[in-house]
Amino acid sequence: MIVVATTDFEVYHGVVNELRDRGTTFTTVEPDEELPEQATVVVTGADHTDDFADVTTIVADPDDPRRAVDQALAAVRGDSGRTVIGVDPGQRPGIAILAGETIVAAFQVPLGDAVDVIQREAAEAPSPVVRIGDGSRLESAKLVNELDTVTVELVDETGTTPYLGTGTRGMGDVLAAVNIARLEGEVVNAREIEPTEGEIQVIKDRSREQSEHNRAIDEVLARRVAAGELTVDEALLEHRNGGNSSSSESGETDHSGES
């Protein structure tokens, strides 16, 4: 059982609300009271770090109660609570955090923010693993190559996107990430992808859509975007500053759909 024992009101309020939101069984005691016999984990504040020698103690940050609750739940589950982070790659990857079979958090963020989110969630977990779907080749390669501080597995994501019924619009990527997290993959340290002509054209088209003047970046910049060296916005900035030359950089606006 999880026990909350602290005199820090902010810690108490944040942790208790988080536990209630998760439907978790817990109890609260004063720090100087005897713990219940079934207590296995104590969540407390920085003022009582060393007061509970016989049980696992989690010290909660009042600004981040979710992290303390994640740690407490993982401790209660023991070895079955290993943290697995599933990622459905794309321009806005779905990210699911699992402790054992339990989903403890989910996110969908722009590709440029995904690595920070994944590293943050993995930072305090014992032996975490990140499982990334092998679809969206360019985006998955970017994530694999930038996640160099955690074990990464590349997963065959065939069939991981579920059917979405009424009222579930926008949930597909996150649910796919959950399914990806539950599949074992091949451990990888890097993923080298040579972009196809079609993938390069998609990047050019995306740059045209984001450009203020309806102009696409050239192939050199598009390949740098494909390699993860630049975002589309950064490539457009280089394009405007004359970093590369191409027909699309002339003074004429190109409406043809081709660069």
Image (cartoon, helix red, strand yellow):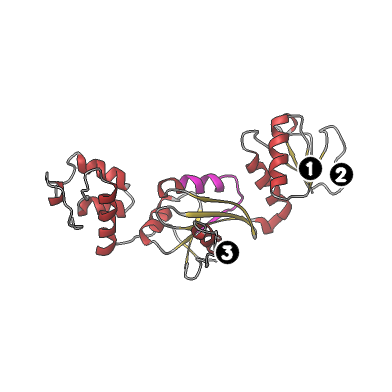
Q: Amino acid at mark 1?
A: Val
Residue 51 colored in magenta in the image: no
Label total for image: 3
For the residues bearing labels 2 and 1, Cβ distance under 8 angstroms: yes
Which label is found at residue 182?
3
Span of residues in magenta: 115-131
Residue shown at 28% from the left, 58% from the top: 202
User: x and y percent of residue 132 in the render?
Assistant: 47, 59
Which quadrant of the view contains residue 200? bottom left
User: Mark 3: which amino acid?
Assistant: Arg
Using a 10 Å C-alpha cutoff, classify the residue at mark 1 as few (fewer than 14 neighbours), some (14 to 19) or many (20 or more): many
Residue occupying the point 15% across, 48% down: 253
Q: Please state which of residues 24 and 213 is positioned toward the viewer in this rendering.
A: 213
Residue drawn 52% across the image and 50% down it = 107
**Residue 6 showing in the rendered view:** yes
Percent position of residue 35, x then y: 85, 41
Image position, residue 127 (x, y; %)? 59, 53
Residue 213, picture quadrant = top left
The residue wearing badge 2 is 36
Mark before the other along the chain sequence, 3 or 2: 2
